[in-house]
Image (cartoon, rainbow, N blue to C red):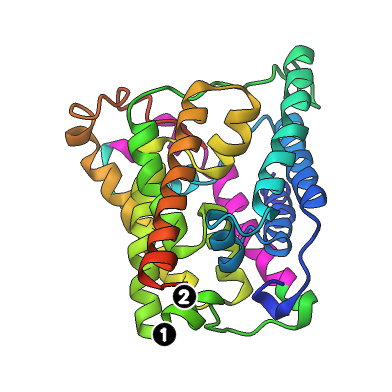
Amino acid sequence: MAIVYIAFGTAFGWVLSRSGAADYDFIQKMFLFESFQLYGIIGTAVVVTAPGLWFLKRRGRTLTGAPLRVSPKPRHPGNIWGGILFGAGWSITGMCPGPILVNVGEGKLYAVAALAGVLVGAALFGVLYERLSGPLQLPALRVGTGDG
Amino acid sequence: MLILHDLAPLHWAVAGAAIGVITLLLLFSTNQRLGISTGFENICALVVHARYFQRSEITGSHGWRLPFLGGLVLGGVFSAIAGGGWQPFWDLGMFDTVIGWGPAGKLAWMFGGGLLIGFGTRMAGGCTSGHGIFGLSNLERASLESTLAFMAAGIVTTNLIYRVWGGI
């Protein structure tokens, strides 16, 4: 199965690489309202995914006939506080999580530092979870903040 | 034009539709909900022994998240090769023209931004893919709130960097 996931990742990575989603300037111009490109990409992706998802959930089965599994993410204050931190980081680096990996693949040397930062940041969050979950009203540890 | 080999980007409608189709196919064929930032926890779980990384959602998903993340890197490699050849480079578009820091400064800048992304996406429970594309498409309120938060923070930060500090 690993090869299937590698293939999905490669296809997704190719699109991110060639669309501007993994391009520092396109991200800045989105946030400066100077380019419609990224708004168009994210908007179109949602417009295509939403009805398809509705249909797949109604059908209720995967390709192999297994029950379809779509669990919504838990709602908690971290959605917003974490979103604010992430948005600042997206602006600073010009990359969101997928494009960090794509940019490393493209040969952008500075993206390796972004990846290192991301891993240290995620590790810090995991280590501090039990201390943060009270003040931030995060879900129980076994549930987590939401996966995806 | 892209920083990568000065290539012309795909039309936004083509790129957006392709992302939507990939998201749907991933769910339909493998029963997986698109999401990238959780994969960073899978990587952390290999080396950091925090209880948070030992929950079943992480230990049970190495088999798909790790190869998927590896595929993203490969997608970038293939894109560079096909677009004019793979070679390491430092070019950073308008950061070079407006801010103008060299390699050491860029590494520090990117590491700092990366910290915010790693910590923030895991606190938010998702990123542009899991909240912005899948969650919004699934009409989830947590995803709507998180997406509005990261878009707003991105707009404020970039405007501070380029319009206030950079003076463009």
Residue B43 as seen in the image, left or right of residue A108:
left
In depth, the one of A38 and B73 nearer the eye is A38
In this view of the protein, can residue A12 be seen by the observer? yes
**What amino acid does circle 1 point to?**
Pro
**Mark 2 residue crowding within 10 angstroms, few (<14) / some (14–19) / many (20+):** many
**Which numbered disc covers residue A54?**
none
Which percent across, then down, holds residue A135? 18, 29
Which percent across, then down, holds residue B25? 77, 36
Which residue is drawn at the image coordinates 41% and 44% (left, top)?
B121
Q: Report if the CB atoms under discs 1 and 2 are less than 8 Å apart.
A: yes
Segment tinted magenta in the rendering: B52-79
Which residue is drawn at the image coordinates 66% and 67% (left, top)?
B76
Q: Quadrant of residue B79?
A: bottom right
Total label count? 2
Q: CA distance from mark 1 to mark 2?
A: 7 Å
Which percent across, then down, holds residue B68? 62, 50
Answer whether residue B55 is magenta in the image: yes
B15 is higher (above) or lower (below) than B137: below
Which residue is drawn at the image coordinates 71% and 47% (left, top)?
A40
Residue matched to label 1: B103
Chain to which the residue tagged by mark 1 belongs: B
Tag 1 secondary structure: helix
Answer whether residue B147 is magenta in the image: no
Residue matched to label 2: A110
Chain to which the residue tagged by mark 2 belongs: A
**What amino acid does circle 2 point to?**
Tyr
Residue A37 as seen in the image, left or right of residue B51:
right
